[in-house]
Image (cartoon, helix red, strand yellow):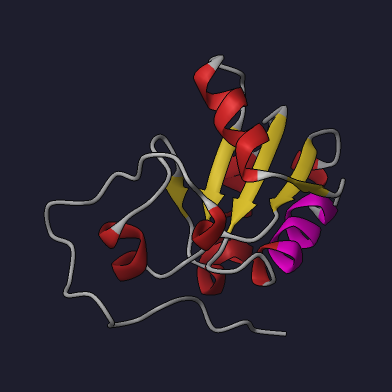
């Protein structure tokens, strides 16, 4: 992992159209309720099976509820051969620290259900 990045810096990168992939590791339900625009949902339990989909990325930012599990996810992604040359960062404070706009899915479940990933570590 290459460290943490602030939510403000992530928002600036996205606003500038930088080549950055924002990987939200929360559950599909939590992601559907609200996520950073343009982010992709790769739930933590699926990360090891789907990490190859991140191959060739230049910069990857992981996001979780509070910025703890995303550190573990960033370490896992950085250890993968296909992302070894990428800059891989965890967003400090998680989605709860995000002050920008959020997108929500049309099929978002009721609030309060399924808050975040269960860490496999």
Verify whether residue 75 appears in magenta.
yes
Which image quadrant is residue 31 in?
A: bottom left
| x, y percent for residue 62 | 63, 52
Q: Residue at x 76, y 61 (%)?
A: 76
In this rendering, position of residue 91 left or right of residue 118: right
Residue 115 place in picture, x, y as percent: 40, 78
Q: Quadrant of the C terminus?
A: bottom right
At 40% across and 70% down in the image, what residue appears?
A: 27
User: In the displayed structure, would residue 16 be above or below residue 52?
Assistant: above
Residue lying furthest front:
99
Q: Residue 101: image x %, image y %? A: 36, 40
Asked if residue 100 lies left or right of residue 5, the reply is left
Main SS, magenta region, reads helix
- Tell whether 18 sits left or right of 28: right
Relative height, residue 52 to residue 67 (above, below):
above
Q: Name the foreground residue: 3 vs 52.
A: 3
At 53% from the left edge and 25% from the top edge, which residue is drawn? Answer: 14
**Res 97 → quadrant:** bottom right
- What residue appears at the point 18 percent right and 62 percent down from the top-left corner? 108
Q: Residue furthest top?
A: 16
When the figure is inspected, residue 7 is found, relative to residue 25, above or below; the finding is: above
Foreground of the two, 77 or 12: 12
Tell me which segment is drawn in magenta: 71-79
Q: Position of residue 53 (x, y in %)?
A: 56, 43
């Amino acid at each position: 992992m290459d460290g943490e990045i602030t939510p403000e810096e992530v928002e600036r990168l996205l606003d500038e159209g930088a080549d950055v992939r924002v990987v939200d590791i929360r559950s599909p339900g939590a992601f559907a309720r609200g996520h950073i625009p343009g982010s992709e949902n790769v739930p933590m339990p699926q990360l090891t099976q789907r990490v190859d989909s991140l191959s060739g990325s230049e910069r990857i930012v992981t996001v979780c509820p509070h910025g703890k599990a995303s550190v573990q996810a960033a370490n896992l992604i950085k250890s993968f051969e296909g992302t070894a040359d990428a800059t891989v960062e965890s967003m400090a404070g998680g989605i709860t620290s995000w002050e920008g706009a959020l997108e929500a899915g049309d099929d978002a479940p009721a609030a309060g259900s399924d808050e975040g990933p269960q860490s496999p570590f």
